[in-house]
Amino acid sequence: MNFCLIFQPYTLGKLGFNMTWSVETLLIVHVAAVASFLGLIAIILLRRGLFRWTSAGFWAWASFALYYALNPLAALYTGTLNRYRICLAIAGGAERGLWILGVALSGMIAFFWAYLRTKPGKITWRLRDDTFTFPMVAFAVLFGAFGVYSLLSYRAFVVDTGRELAFERGRHVGQVTGYESSAYCFLTIPILLLVSSKSRGARVCGWIACGLWMLFALPNGWARAGLVSMLIAVSMVEVIQRKAAWPRWFFVPLILVFTTALMMRGHKMWTLETSASELLNLSGETVQNLGKSLVGILGSGDAAALSTWYLESWVTEQYTGYSYGLPLINYALTGWIPGRILPQKYFLVDWLAARQRPLPNAQVKWLLHGAKSTLFGSFYQDGWLVGVVLMAAGVGVLSRKLDGMMLPEAPLLVRATGAAWMSLLWMVWQSSGIWALIALGVLVMPVLAMWLFAPKELAASQYEITYRSYRPYSQKWKRIE
């Protein structure tokens, strides 16, 4: 901890670097630096054929551009800088801004260095082919049925369970469990498997299921990310099937208008009967004023991850301290166990929270409930600049491996899982490590059950044993002859 304090941004003034920059000047420098770096990375990705729709590197690049360049640029253009001003005033001014700029660039460099140096290879999970056994289909149906119940109950509000859905500090404390309210995500993989099928009838069923899923999820104002991700996922499946670099011409404008309309809607709840008309009205308004709507959304507080990072990094250094990845470890080890079975499953998180100093005032607490500080901000909470560099490099390696799941030669189950995971990256990069772990983990649960009963390839050692066991017999018969 003492080592970290030596290099904290608030010591820059003591070293003679007294910053008197305005917020506007700081953001102009920030945007120029990030844009220049991302321009160089775009050229490198293009030359390597990685600037494409089904590349994890492209989605990381797009996320960095959105949260670290386009949002502050839109805020400058519209003059909506109050959030930046308040966060910087609390966190230490321009020194804090320059420090976070350096940390962000370090994280991006570490990510792309690891990403470009990692060989993807075809990921197969040892699956022999695209054969689906009866147990695999049975598990898909079982998870799908649970997902339909969750969709109708907690997204479309068609089924009234009469049970309380309540949260406290991001945890389910009511009568409804986390699995019940999130199980609608279990439908994603079965839908993508159908859409990816070689059978025309299965693909038609998949597209119908996709449309129904989106229709029933639309009433819930907190389903925005899932709706956009489903559109991105099916567009990725279409790209893989055509062995192309980009989706058909209508997908990108559709996703853009759909996302902007949902962002304008906010977290407002709709009814199933009025959802379609409400969406059409919002989409019409969005198309008529697309440029103005886009600039407004880009400069809004929902996308102001950079300003949150300014404040959150200061709170981490001055009050809460670094978490050293303990919350992430806790969620990975026991977060998937239902709380009714293990009530103390968040033991590490609670132990850490009990030793943290309280926040200075309600204003800071309110500001931290805005946009998340991005994945880099989460890594900074875990372990300062060192945590950002090391964990960004690790994510870079995993992202390159994810590219290997999107190859047309990969097994169908692997491709569907890859599309589901990659479709979430635009939100993963603006979230935290814990949110990413939960979101990606929920999607893969049906896959794990199906994989257990899938036909597997023999390992190399098994081939070798089989060869050796038959060789002596062939030699014996030759000697007899």
Image: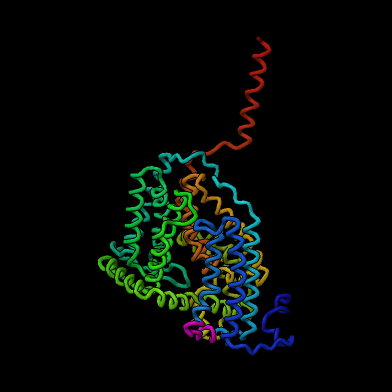
Q: Residue 171, relative to residue 150: is it above or below?
A: below
Q: Quadrant of the N terminus?
A: bottom right
Note whether 260 is above or below 145 in the view shown: below
Write down the region rendered in magenta. 76-86
Whether residue 357 appears in this view of the structure is no
Question: In the picture, which quadrant includes the C terminus?
Answer: top right
Query: For residue 46, which quarter of the picture?
Result: bottom right
Residue 81 horizontal/vertical position (percent): 51, 85
Magenta run includes residue 79? yes
Q: Position of residue 464 (x, y in %)?
A: 64, 31
- Is-magenta flag for residue 58? no
**Residue at 64% of width from left, 18% of height from top?**
474
* Dominant secondary structure, magenta: helix
Mark yes or no: residue 170 visible.
yes
Asked whether, in this view, residue 457 is left or right of residue 391, the answer is left
Residue located at (60% from left, 76% from top): 32
Could you tell me how many numbered marks the image carries? 0
